[in-house]
Image (cartoon, helix red, strand yellow):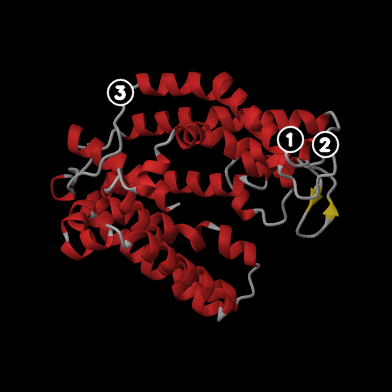
Amino acid sequence: FIISGFLITTLLLRDIDRHGGIRIRLFYLRRALRILPAALFYIAVIWALYLAGVVDLTYHHLSETHVATAIPDLIHVLTFTANYQLDYNWYFNHQWSLSVEEQFYFVWPFALYWFGARHGTRGVIAAILIVPFVRLAMYLMDRPDLALSREFQAVCDSLAMGCLTALTYNRLVANRVVATLTRWPAIPLGGLLIALGYGAAFISRPLAYIAGQTVANIGIVLLLLHVIQHPRGLAGTILNTRPFIAIGILSYSLYLWQEPFLYFRGTDWATAFPQNIVLAFAAATFSYFLVERPFLALKDRLGHPSRPAPVDTATADPQSPR
């Protein structure tokens, strides 16, 4: 979520810098071409397999019961509200994170479009400070653990942290302390912060909800800045090798298609290791070339695609939209 918040905000700021404002319709059209075709293709295939009796969408894992129909599951994934369906079926389970992303797209670009970078910065800082207490309140209200890790109001501070990193990028990298920390200490320090943040749950659940996620998020930001600022370092070199580049290209399709083959309760040949890994990559590759890449090409023909690169928010505050 941090990387997503960072990348989307960077693209929006670049649009402001180049065109004097966010081209909001073009942004949503390009996002739709990026996200919807591959997601709808996956949903359609899984639904067809369900109707054919090949997969079971009626078994819900939280309650460990069968429901009468999978129609509510289908509605949740089609409306990108799967993160609020806590009693899930496995094949649509991973759609919760895509739902969070889509809810973020619905809120943040409009907020930045209407209020500008300066007010947007204040807004994401407020989210980073307030959301941990929202998690704590949900915990004290005995909300399920899944709600605290999936529902938008409980996880959007991670997206906000990525947004804030993009909004303040130039100031961050110009800061001597930050510049020093993003060199060699970044990997061990970032890893330590992530371990401490998530490890807080073993000490105190309230502590984890109040501070743990924020500490882990800072560690992730530190690693992100290290890779961006030092692309020829060890981490950057590894991430730019051909296998990692290939995985990056397939990442969205792989995210969608790994789920049927990594079914932890699966007992058939397709879900057994190691062929399940091969089949997941094969399905992702098929989806990428058949569905995703043609729509990506169409997306790139709409306007001029920009390589994500942070800009100075001091000169990137949009005027009031016409």
Work out which residue is located at the far bottom of the displayed protein and give it: 203
Q: Quadrant of the C terminus?
A: top left
Residue type at the position of mark 2: Trp
Give the Cα separation between the discs numbered 1 and 2. 8 Å
Give the Cα separation between the discs numbered 3 and 2. 46 Å
Residue to which mark 2 is pinned: 269
Residue to which mark 1 is pinned: 275
Q: Nearer the viewer, mark 3 or mark 2?
A: 2
Work out which residue is located at the far left of the displayed protein and give it: 315
Q: Residues within 10 Å of mark 3 (few under 14, many from 20)?
A: few
**Marker disc for residue 303:** 3
Q: Residues within 10 Å of mark 2 (few under 14, many from 20)?
A: few
Q: Residues within 10 Å of mark 1 (few under 14, many from 20)?
A: few
300 sits to left or right of 254: left
Q: Is residue 280 visible?
A: yes
Residues tagged 1 and 3 counted as in contact (Cβ below 8 A): no
